[in-house]
């Protein structure tokens, strides 16, 4: 019998100029080794090819913008592969801050809230579209030292929702138990809510456990060395969930750079 191996479907290759683009727009790109860059590129291509990308009314979404957002999202799942993003349906990009108006669910379950609310991003429910503000993507990508990243934040919400609930508990894998996760995250969350100072975690993490996870994710990827120093337990459980050690990556990169001149 004649048998021919099926060729994999042709996918667009990661254009060399996109690497230059990431060099420019994604400061963390410099820290990735060749294998990590290959994996990131593959996941980014998959996100570009399989998700719906939309611009808000009157805004023009370019391929360069899509690539930048897809690359940031792919960094989050470098250790997990693309599977956690199976529930991502659409990414809607707005030029800047979006103001939500009207009645919506409040921060406490079962409550509603009114009035305008400016937001940089949103991942409202499991299957719904995500919303991202483009100016925040550029600003956060260039300045990880600020510990914020709207793309990491919103995609962390999606990972949290994989089990159907935005409750601050992502799929935990084999390395961390639910008990340990609750103990560590519960302690930081309670402390943030009590108004105690956590220099690496934004106070927005005190809103609820889902925001705590998203905010902690931002710190984990963007200020990993500071997070290890200030919140070693939290860093540890996040490393066990994301299967990455961004602090080691940052330190390796720092050590490999030539010393600053006089
Ligand atoms: Zn959030």
Image: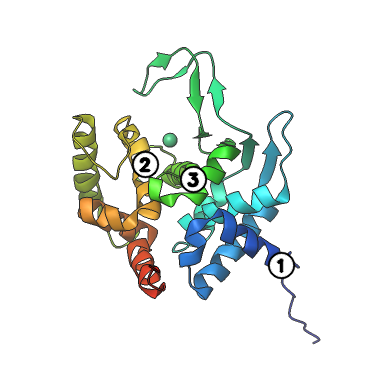
The residues bearing labels 2 and 3 have C-alpha atoms spaced at a distance of 13 Å
Q: Earlier in the sequence, mark 2 or mark 3?
A: 3
Q: Nearer the viewer, residue 170 or 244?
A: 244
Q: Nearer the viewer, residue 230 or 108?
A: 230
**Quadrant of the frame with the N terminus:** bottom right
Q: Nearer the viewer, residue 221 or 31?
A: 31
Q: Assign ligand 1 to one image quadrant.
A: top left
Instruction: Check the image and report above or below for 220 versus 90.
Output: below
Task: Check if mark 1's residue and mark 3's residue have beta carbons within 8 Å.
Answer: no
Label 3 sits on residue: 140
The residues bearing labels 1 and 2 have C-alpha atoms spaced at a distance of 33 Å
Q: Residue at x 52, y 43 (%)?
A: 139
Left or right placement of residue 102 versus residue 246 in this view: right
> Dot 3: within a 10 Å radius of its alpha carbon, few (fewer than 14), some, or many (20 or more) residues?
many
Q: Which mark is residue 13?
A: 1
Q: Residue at x 34, y 32 (%)?
A: 204
Residue 245 in view: yes
């Amino acid at each position: 019998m004649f048998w021919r191996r099926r060729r994999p479907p042709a996918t667009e290759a990661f254009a060399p100029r996109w690497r230059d683009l990431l060099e420019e727009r994604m400061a963390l790109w410099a820290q990735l080794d060749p294998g990590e860059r290959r994996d990131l590129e593959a996941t980014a291509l998959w996100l570009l090819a399989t998700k719906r990308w939309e611009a808000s009314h009157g805004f023009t979404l370019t391929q360069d913008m899509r690539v930048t957002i897809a690359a940031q999202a792919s960094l989050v799942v470098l250790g997990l592969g693309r599977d956690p993003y199976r529930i991502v349906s659409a990414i809607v990009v707005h030029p800047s801050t979006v103001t939500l108006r009207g009645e919506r669910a409040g921060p406490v379950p079962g409550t509603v809230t009114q009035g305008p609310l400016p937001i940089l991003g949103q991942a409202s429910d499991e299957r719904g579209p995500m919303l991202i503000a483009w100016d925040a993507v550029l600003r956060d990508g260039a300045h990880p030292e600020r510990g914020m990243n709207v793309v990491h934040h919103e995609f962390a919400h999606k990972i949290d929702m994989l089990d159907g609930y935005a409750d601050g508990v992502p799929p935990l894998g084999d390395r961390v138990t639910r008990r340990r996760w609750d103990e560590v995250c519960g302690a930081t969350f309670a402390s943030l809510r009590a108004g105690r100072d956590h220099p690496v975690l934004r106070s927005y993490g005190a809103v609820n456990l889902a925001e705590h996870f998203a905010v902690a994710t931002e710190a984990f990827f963007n200020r990993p060395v500071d997070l290890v120093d200030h919140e070693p337990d939290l860093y540890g459980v996040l490393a066990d969930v994301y299967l990455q050690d961004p602090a080691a990556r940052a330190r390796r990169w720092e050590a490999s750079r030539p010393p600053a001149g006089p």
